[in-house]
Amino acid sequence: MNIQLHQSIVDNQESEVIITGSKSESNRLLILQALLNKLEIKNLSNSDDTQVLQKALSSSEREIDVHHAGTAMRFLTAYFSMLENREVLLTGSTRMQERPISVLVDALKDLGADIQYEKKEGYPPLLIKGKKLTQDKVSLLANVSSQYISALLLMGAFLPNGLELNLIGKVTSVPYIKMTLQLLEQVGVNSDFEGNSIKVKPIIHRQSILNNTCLTVESDWSSASYFYSIVALSEPGTKILLSTYKEQSLQGDSSLQDIYKQFGVSTIFKENTILLQKLKAVSEDVVVDLNLSNAPDIAQTIAVTCYGLGVACNIKGLHTLKIKETDRLEALRVELSKLGANIEVTNESLHLKKREGEINENISIATYQDHRMAMAFAPLALKVGIVIEECEVVSKSYPGFWQDLKSIGFKINKI
Ligand SMILES: O=C(O)C1=C[C@@H](OP(=O)(O)O)[C@@H](O)[C@H](O)C1
Ligand SMILES: C=C(OP(=O)(O)O)C(=O)O
């Protein structure tokens, strides 16, 4: 189903939006909950990716399908590898079967795992025969996806001697690795990350460590990015309140606070909420220069904000975007061009020229089964009418997205 967004403005009152838990934190905690005896999780994400993982962890079926959920695919590959006496055929959507997994599978095999490719070498589906992993040290490439590293770390503490990783190449998406280590620490696992080496100590007294541990997931900063974009594209004075956030976040996408200052948006923490406010208009002569290798999921939001504001941008550090839900660099190039943009992409960067004319009106934006394509382009409705195709894709990370846009004043109808 497509959605028509008519030109809109954000309601005048201080609109409040409640965003559910981070899907990255939620999916790590669900794996830890399954490995530990007792762990209560509050403010769990309501995303499809989290529900898919929750269902997989409680399933006793031989075949498990994680659909589009990258973290579920990678975390479960490591998890089922060490689950003795269990055989699982782990599969996913057509796109998931094109997202590489050999770096993780090779590392797990080096640790002693029994994993076979069921179709194409290097890609899901995987046949995993769970067994005791005998090794405790492994080297792996760190510049393809940090999810492979997080997957290994989450199970590392449950190996008899812990785990030592030697990371080869430039480490990408580092805040996600730190998030994994910080959550491990919150359940009592010590680790050490120095240079290209990460050591996770074995968890010893599971019972005593975990008596009554209850962790609350902070709300999702990647989801917050769409509201940053909305405020940036609105008139000075516009305010939106988002909950529930912490000043000391585990999520790298909280760098939005700094990034959006150059788009005239301030962030003020008030107890557990953030108030986003548009302070001033942005000069069209600004050139935005960013490296997003630590925050790849907000690249689409920022590129569209820049186009909406009419400013030029050069974004680097985007080498992981080609293997996500779609080739996000190519998808951005095609869809922004339809709106009139002068844009070029390489395998790891995006270059958008300052906008000369108006934004083309009532363009239909294809979303390539990528939730972030739909959500990143929607804020442009503050400038022109726009159609977003296959609007239901948003449920991968943010099922209530369209409802929340309506609640702050967006004029929307399904077509
Ligand atoms: O560990 C995680 O929760 C994630 C890591 C990132 O992936 P890469 O490390 O592949 O960039 C990010 O893009 C993804 O949405 C979530
Ligand atoms: C890349 C993403 O998710 P995943 O890799 O977990 O499918 C995302 O949510 O933007």
Image (cartoon, grey):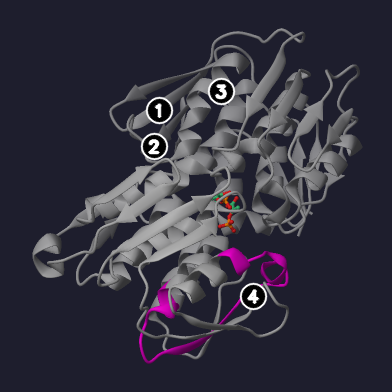
Point out the tag, 4 or 1, that comes first from the N-terminus: 4
Q: How many angstroms separate mark 2 from mark 1 (CA)?
A: 6 Å
Badge 1 element: strand
Q: Which of 343 and 16 is in front in this view?
A: 343
Magenta residues span 79-103
Q: Name the residue under label 3.
A: 259
Give the quarter of the figure containing the C terminus. bottom right
Amino acid type at circle 3 is Ile
Amino acid type at circle 4 is Pro
Point out the tag, 2 or 1, that comes first from the N-terminus: 2
The image quadrant of residue 73 is bottom right
User: Furthest residue to the left?
Assistant: 208
In this picture, is 156 found above or below 262? Answer: below
Q: Mark 2 points at which residue?
A: 243
Residue 185 relative to residue 144: left or right: left
Image position, residue 230 (x, y; %): 62, 29
Q: How many angstroms separate mark 4 from mark 1 (CA)?
A: 40 Å
- Mark 3 burial class by Cα count in 10 Å: few <14, some 14-19, many 20+: some
Point out the tag, 3 or 4, that comes first from the N-terminus: 4
The image quadrant of residue 384 is top right
Badge 4 element: loop
Q: Mark 4 points at which residue?
A: 124
Q: Mark 1 points at which residue?
A: 274
Point out the tag, 3 or 2, that comes first from the N-terminus: 2
